[in-house]
Image (tube, rainbow, N blue to C red):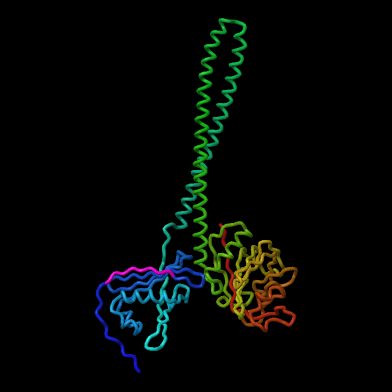
């Protein structure tokens, strides 16, 4: 029996706003429906990533053309109720399709058969109200204020010490006058008057010292408050800078949300802030031969190397040493290995291995940790001889020998980036 479309019914103007929460794969999404004058707007928010929002707009007529089931709807309210019922019955599935796109899939039963309706939402651009530059300017301004307050505080302490010294001198002078008064009663009366004046001056100085100490406490409180604000601003600046670097990485191997692990490990080993990252070399574009690698990367230190085997194993190394083709190994205490598939860092002191006939390679005690010998895109020249790393480098099953050592396989891709510090 053929499906016969139902007649379209003229819709009245509606204004509807609804928000639904959807939990899926340990993620919390918020689905927002806005309907104004027959136009339907769907928005998806990832509650863990407030910087991302996805959206699709379509008219009521476009909705009817999307699937036959919508021909039965008399108004946009019917669509709103349809979404609400689908969420309640767990018929909605949210998928991350592409880098800037998310898909809503709805399972329906229509004329004795099951079908899936899909809505593709594109990511909206969200502009942060507080840019890195504004934070940096605010950071410098607060730092300058703190320096001035610290200088004023030191000046007040110096003045306080001078006043205390003057007070000590006055006390000594007062004691001398008392001794002299013993020898002459007339002089004693005169000296008593003078002493009273000195006492009055002493109390004035004591009050002044107390006032200065109170002022010191107020200044210290201001400095503490400014330090709290400075730390908060610095944390915001670091967060935005890390997020901007992660979004700017142009890699066919590394996902943008995977850079946080590498960022933290680099900061831990170098104790430096990263301000940017620059792509130096990509094997599939710049040529997989070692001489092409050395032309692009020699003389450059602080490099991040990413590898992908033909078995889609993804891993990499960060090195502090610079590349050169002199044919020897240079120890690097800041060098560490990581697995993107396992989301794990291996903190070991490796050697950066420089050779004209090799791509980016690393050794430990003259044994390859990772080796690119020749053109690994064409030949099985992506190698390691560390048995305990076989779960990271294995890739293809036939790349492992009987004793479990990884002898070599082709590389699908490898890339080199320069890490630029503040």
Horizontal relation, residue 284 to residue 20: left or right: right
Q: Position of residue 136 (x, y in %)?
A: 48, 53
Residue 74 to residue 296: above or below? below
Identify the residue at image location x=62%, y=82%.
Answer: 378
Horizontal relation, residue 284 to residue 36: left or right: right
Q: Main secondary structure of the magenta part?
A: strand
Q: Is residue 93 on the magenta stretch?
A: no
Residue 375 in view of the camera:
no
Q: Position of residue 352 (x, y in %)?
A: 68, 67
**Which image quarter is the N terminus in?**
bottom left
Q: Nearer the viewer, residue 286 or 410?
A: 410
Give the mark count. 0
Q: Position of residue 408 (x, y in %)?
A: 68, 80
Residue 201 in view of the camera:
yes
Q: Nearer the viewer, residue 192 or 132?
A: 192
Q: Position of residue 370 (x, y in %)?
A: 67, 73
Give, as a single range, the part of the protein colored magenta.
14-21
Identify the residue at image location x=75%, y=68%.
Answer: 365
Residue 319 to residue 394: above or below? above
Q: Quadrant of residue 343?
A: bottom right
**Which image quarter is the C terminus in?**
bottom right
Q: Nearer the viewer, residue 105 or 386?
A: 105
């Amino acid at each position: 029996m053929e499906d016969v479309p139902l007649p379209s019914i003229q819709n009245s103007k509606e204004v509807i706003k609804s928000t639904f929460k959807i939990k899926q794969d340990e993620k919390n999404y918020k689905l927002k429906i806005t309907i104004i004058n027959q136009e339907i707007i769907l928005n998806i928010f990832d509650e863990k990533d407030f910087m991302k929002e996805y959206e699709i707009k379509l008219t009521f007529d476009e909705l009817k053309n999307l699937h036959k089931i919508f021909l039965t709807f008399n108004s946009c309210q019917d669509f709103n109720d349809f979404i609400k019922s689908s969420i309640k019955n767990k018929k909605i599935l949210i998928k991350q399709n592409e880098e800037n796109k998310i898909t809503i899939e709805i399972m329906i039963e229509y004329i004795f058969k099951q079908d899936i309706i899909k809505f593709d939402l594109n990511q909206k651009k969200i502009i942060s109200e507080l840019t890195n530059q504004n934070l940096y300017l605010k950071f410098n301004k607060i730092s300058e204020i703190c320096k001035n307050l610290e200088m004023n505080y030191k000046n007040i302490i110096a003045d306080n010490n001078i006043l205390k010294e003057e007070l000590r001198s006055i006390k000594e002078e007062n004691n001398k006058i008392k001794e002299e008064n013993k020898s002459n009663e007339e002089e004693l009366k005169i000296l008593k008057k003078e002493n009273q004046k000195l006492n009055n001056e002493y109390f004035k100085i004591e009050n002044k010292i107390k006032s200065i100490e109170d002022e010191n406490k107020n200044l210290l409180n201001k400095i503490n408050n400014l330090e709290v604000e400075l730390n908060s601003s610095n944390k915001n600046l670091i967060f935005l800078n890390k997020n901007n670097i992660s979004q700017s990485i142009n890699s066919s191997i590394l996902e943008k949300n995977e850079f946080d692990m590498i960022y933290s490990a680099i900061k831990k080993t170098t104790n430096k802030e990263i301000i940017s990252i620059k792509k130096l070399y990509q094997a599939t574009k710049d040529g997989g031969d070692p001489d092409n690698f050395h032309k692009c990367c020699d003389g450059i230190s602080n490099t991040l190397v990413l590898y992908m085997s033909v078995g889609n194993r993804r891993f990499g190394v960060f090195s502090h040493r610079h590349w050169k083709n002199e044919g020897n190994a240079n120890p690097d205490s800041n060098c560490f290995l990581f697995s993107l598939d396992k989301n794990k860092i291996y903190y070991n002191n490796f050697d950066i291995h420089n050779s004209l006939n090799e791509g980016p390679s690393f050794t430990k005690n003259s044994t390859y940790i990772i080796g690119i010998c020749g053109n690994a895109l064409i030949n099985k020249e992506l190698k390691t001889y560390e048995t305990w790393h076989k779960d990271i480098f294995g890739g293809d099953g036939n790349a492992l020998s009987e004793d479990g050592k990884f002898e070599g396989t082709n590389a699908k891709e490898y890339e080199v980036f320069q890490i630029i510090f503040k």
